[in-house]
Image (cartoon, helix red, strand yellow):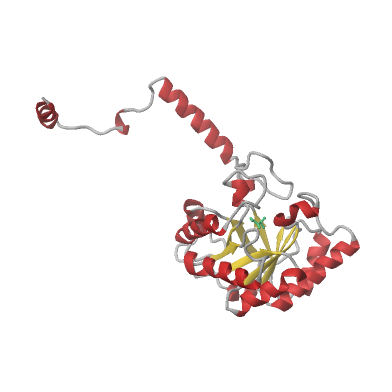
Amino acid sequence: MSEERKKVTLRTLFAKKEQGVPITMLTCYDYPTAYFMEQAGIDILLVGDSLGMTILGYDSTLPVTMDIMVPHAQAVRRGSPSALLIGDMPYMTYQPSIETAIRNAGRFMAEAGCDAIKLEGGVEIADRVEAIAKVGIPVMGHLGLTPQSVSALGGFRVQGRGAEQAKKIVDDAKALEDAGAFSILLEMVPARVCKLITERAGVPIISLGSGPDADGQLLIFHDMFGLYPKFTPRMARVYGDAGKVILDGIAQYAEDVTTRDFPQRENWFTMKDDAFEELKRLLG
Ligand code: KIV
């Protein structure tokens, strides 16, 4: 736990890559969780469009919009002033045109105080990455399993197991770096491919289910604590069953109310006799 944290910057991340010190990254969608992540000294907080699934209960990330994302990013910024805060560009907020991409990236910076944005895709969106980076907004790339293309990728599955597909991911990583991405996230790519990209890259590579040899690791917060009821992916490590704690607590509360065990004396407030007598008099 750190009391006075130094602000995490791109320079911090590059220094960690250089020194071989792993970068820590988590998804975060709200103020209290951001507060805890700040206390724990997490380097990067990603306000992921995964909130469409983890928070809003959709089956995919596709229904998420900028108007949904911005208030979450604002809340996370309030909870964590020091972490490097990344806003995740939702579906169709950067694909249609370069101008759309710059405007929406700018919203994360201006309205939510983000430090960077993330978008999905390789060589086909390299012009967006270049344009956003050129206006001074740091961009993280995202390759491998890219949830906004889940339909085209044939579901939530490992990407790049075959040599041709793996080569495309390696080439995409190079294209993103050349376009000015400050970092690249590899999601569900074979560990050997991730290692190869990390060794070749001049920018920090972050792994989500892509093995130990990246410059940093990312987990989805809800997977870590049993908070996503539909499934827990194999790539996650579970650090506690907060879902069970919450369910047990809610069930106990329902029983306590039903049996009149709640509330107890310490849960309510009193009024002096004379004030109450006066109230009765006023009411006639
Ligand atoms: O939205 C998100 O949280 C993400 C992660 C799955 C990398 O993009």
- Residue in view at x 78 percent, y 64 percent: 194
x then y, percent, for residue 203:
70, 74
Residue 42 in picture, x, y percent from top left:
56, 61
Front residue of 128/257: it is: 128
Name the residue furthest bottom.
134
At 72% from the left and 46% from the top, the residue drawn is 233
The residue at the point 66 percent across, 52 percent down is 62
Q: Quadrant of residue 99?
A: bottom right
Above or below — where is 53 with respect to 122? above
Residue 200 spot, x, y in % from top left: 79, 74
Left or right for 168, reference 30: right
Residue 196 visible? The answer is: no
Indicate whether 179 appears above or below 76. below
In which quadrant of the rendered image does the C terminus lie?
Answer: top left
Single out the residue that lies furthest toward the right: 163
Front position in the image: 133 or 80: 133
Decide which of 63, 123 is in the foreground and name it.
63
Front-most of residues 34 and 108: 108
**Going by the image, does 284 lie left or right of 88?**
left
Q: Is residue 39 left or right of residue 87?
A: left
Image location (x, y in percent) of residue 101? 62, 69
Ligand 1 quadrant assignment: bottom right
Figure quadrant of residue 57 = top right
Quick check: 151 above or below 278?
Answer: below
Q: In the image, what residue occupies the spot 54% across and 33% down? A: 247
